[in-house]
Amino acid sequence: MFSSILIVCTGNICRSPMGEYLLRERWQAPGARVASAGVQALIDWPADEEAIKAMQARGIDLSPHRARQISPEISQDADLILVMEDFHRDWIHSRLPTARGRVHGMGKWIDLPEVPDPYRRGPAAFEQAYDLLDRCVDSWLERIG
């Protein structure tokens, strides 16, 4: 049984906070905790404005988010670590070897090898990222309850 999930992308200002807030909103298990971080985080930066807009259009307020760097402490606290692309998995495995076995692709259950990075690609890219993350979150929820 999972109680803590960490969602990881590169800068922790687009994909991972969007995934974090989506999962946090939908995962209703008692004591469930969801967080996000980046492998090259823009520490303390707010979520990208386009990410905020994409989430706001669906009634989710992403404005409180502040980026943070993944660390041994953050990774140890997670039962499951979901990444957006293979680069993130490889980065975590090489620097945080104790996380092995807990790192999986966000799109694993929908045969999606990666969630493309929408950073600086305009509103349409963020809409696509949201749609993919929406499907990914639902697919994980089917398995974790």
Image (spheres, rainbow, N blue to C red):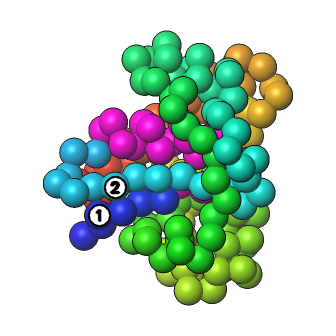
- The quadrant the C terminus occupies is bottom left
Residue 33 is tagged as 2
- The residue type indicated by label 1 comes to Ser
Residue 22: horizontal and vertical position, in percent? 42, 36
Quadrant of the image occupied by residue 54:
top right
Residue 93: horizontal and vertical position, in percent? 67, 79
Q: Nearer the viewer, residue 122 or 74?
A: 74
Left or right: residue 126 versus residue 122 is left
Q: Nearer the viewer, residue 114 or 69?
A: 69
Question: Which residue was labeled with disc 1?
Answer: 3
For the view shown, which residue lies furthest in the right direction?
120
Stretch in magenta: 7-26
Classify 126 as above or below 116.
above
Q: Is residue 87 visible?
A: yes
For the view shown, which residue lies furthest in the left direction?
30
Mark closer to the chain start, 2 or 1: 1
Classify 16 as above or below 93.
above
Cα separation, mark 2 vs mark 1, equals 6 Å
Residue at x-position 63% and y-position 64%: 70
Magenta segment main secondary structure: helix
Q: Nearer the viewer, residue 15 or 66?
A: 66
Callout 1: SS? loop
Residue at x-position 51% and y-position 32%: 64
Please say whether residue 6 is one of the residues in the magenta stretch: no
For the view shown, which residue lies furthest in the bottom direction?
98
Classify 143 as above or below 131.
below
Residue 19: horizontal and vertical position, in percent? 51, 42
Label 2 with label 1: CB-CB less than 8 Å: yes
